[in-house]
Amino acid sequence: ISITTPRMISWAGEPIQLETEVVHDDPESLTYSWEATTPEGDPLEEPAVFEPGDDVANPTITVNYHASIFRVTVAVDDGINEPVTATRLLDVADNPCQAARALGIGDDYPADIAANCIHDLEDYAEIASEWLVDFIITEPVAMPEEE
């Protein structure tokens, strides 16, 4: 078995589609068991949600808080042999902006001047400090003569 879903980054509340590849003579006889943990194997702060459940071949997984990196593991059992497992690391950011910054495409959020993924007073203060910066007159200037 392998999890064919590539390493992905998402954000809190946004599902990731999990895909598996299994080579077996009788795939209908297989049972699946999915689990989400920290990379070290400890329980997550809040459980991840598998839809339609953690016992299907290719569920979606949603983490409803910022978990950073987490690990998904699937165990597949045919009822005869020892269960086989596969794992994949996934990432969850607080919001789409942080996910984009983690991928290096944070410039898609140009209004986030402070680069903290929050549009707040700090961003507006930065914009205001640059407002009219090219038009500062530092000393008296003679008006051009009219022709």
Image (cartoon, rainbow, N blue to C red):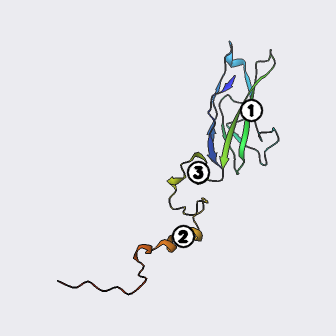
Residue 68 spot, x, y in % from top left: 70, 47
Q: Residues within 10 Å of mark 3 (few under 14, many from 20)?
A: some
Residue 78 spot, x, y in % from top left: 76, 18
Q: CA distance from mark 2 to mark 3?
A: 20 Å
Query: Which residue is tagged 1?
Result: 73
Numbered disc 1: secondary structure: strand
Q: Does the residue at mark 2 contact the one at mark 3 (Cβ under 8 Å)?
A: no
Q: Is residue 127 above or below residue 70?
A: below
Q: CA distance from mark 2 to mark 1?
A: 45 Å
Residue at 55% in and 61% down: 112
Residue 32 vs residue 84, the one in the foreground: 84
* Mark 3 / mark 1, whichever is N-terminal: 1
Numbered disc 3: secondary structure: helix
Give the farthest residue toward the left. 147
Q: Residues within 10 Å of mark 1 (few under 14, many from 20)?
A: some
Residue at 66% in and 34% down: 59
**Residue type of the residue flagged with mark 2:** Glu
* Mark 2 / mark 1, whichever is N-terminal: 1
**Residue type of the residue flagged with mark 3:** Arg
Q: Is residue 26 above or below residue 51?
A: above
Numbered disc 2: secondary structure: helix
Left or right of 131? Residue 27 is right
**Residue type of the residue flagged with mark 1:** Thr
Query: Which residue is tagged 2?
Result: 126
Residue 27 spot, x, y in % from top left: 68, 18
Residue 102 vs residue 129, the one in the foreground: 129
Indicate the quadrant containing the N terminus: top left, top right, bottom left or bottom right.
top right
Query: Which residue is tagged 3?
Result: 101
